[in-house]
Amino acid sequence: MKTLQPFKIYLFISAVILFSGCAEVKTGEPPPQAIMPPTVCQGSAAFLILNDQAATEAAACKDNTTISFYRDNATAPLRALLGTDLDEPPGGKELRISIVAKDGRFRQQRIAYTVLKKDFSTQHLTLPGAKGVPGQQTDERFEREKAIVEKIFTRTVQEKLWCGVFIRPIAGEITTDFGTRRFINGVPKNHHTGIDIKAPAGTPVAAPANGRVLYTGRFSLSGNSIFIDHGTGICTMYFHLASIAVQSGQKVKKGDTIGTVGSTGRSTGPHLHWGARINNQRVDPLALVALFNK
């Protein structure tokens, strides 16, 4: 992408990516642009921070997806959230940042960083009957439902709806980690795109942060499900619920009860599947919690 209005301006620009999980900062002298790119891993969550008071707005481009920046207040740095999908190929990456200055002039900045491969665990499950070995009709239904889910994620907004830190929706033992490769009745399946938290049926599930309910419904695999948009590209999901206490379009606050733990859909017992996406990148929800608690 070419600069729309070429100009020279002498600023000290500092762009730093703050990260959670599987990350390490490169050593050595920083490049002339005073950018310090770290390495992040598959499934991680990060802040992209642009310390430039002359900038009024900014947006990054990653894999043809626009990532919008926001400010917490007039003197705070511009921030954006950077998610790295659990299937993101490891290696060198580059972000292009478009910056608009107070005088309306436009410029671009590039940030290079590295994604590390993460070694995910494996899990073997045995499920009875149709739950374990879906037939052709079941597979076709899954594909139809998958298309519905993908459309849900296109309805998220870049406006910041959350404030403060994110919390866990329930307490309890994590029985399946994010990214775990599952084998159901010996058949390899996709990586687990969230975490499973064990809890008694009927346990209240809380919203981890302020947001707006994008969708509620029942799916063959995930059972009773809720999708919440928190703005700035963050969307969280809650599956296998016994009951749903919110409606699509409803605003929720951190700590509000949105449903109860159950075992609907393809499930071996009562638990909550909690997932998260940042700009449609599948990330570990615990990495999201850790990021906001730094």
Image (tube, grey):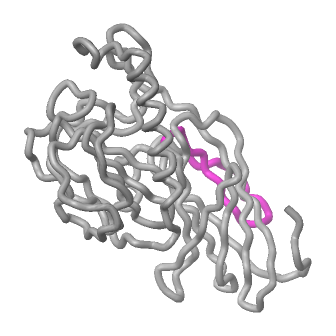
Using the image as rendered, state which of residue 7 and residue 152 is in the foreground: 152
Prevailing SS of the magenta stretch: loop
Residue 219 appears in the rendering:
yes
Image check: 259 left or right of 10? left
Res. 191 image quadrant: top left
- The image shows residue 146, relative to residue 205, as above or below, that is above
Image check: 131 left or right of 58? left
- The image shows residue 202, relative to residue 52, as above or below, that is above
Using the image as rendered, state which of residue 6 and residue 187 is in the foreground: 187
Q: Tell which residue pokes out farthest to the bottom in this image.
A: 103
Give coordinates of residue 206: x percent, y percent: 20, 57
- The image shows residue 229, relative to residue 6, as above or below, that is above
| Stretch in magenta | 24-43
Picture quarter with the N terminus: bottom right
Give coordinates of residue 267: x percent, y percent: 23, 28
Using the image as rendered, state which of residue 227 and residue 256 is in the foreground: 227
Picture quarter with the C terminus: bottom left
Q: How many labels does the image show?
A: 0
Residue 289 appears in the rendering:
no
The residue lying at 53 percent from left, 50 percent from top is: 280
The residue lying at 26 percent from left, 70 percent from top is: 253
Give coordinates of residue 3: x percent, y percent: 87, 71
The residue lying at 29 percent from left, 42 percent from top is: 218
Give coordinates of residue 174: x percent, y percent: 23, 36
Res. 5 image quadrant: bottom right
Q: Is residue 289 magenta?
A: no
Q: Does the magenta stretch include residue 27?
A: yes
The residue lying at 35 percent from left, 53 percent from top is: 227
Res. 10 image quadrant: bottom right
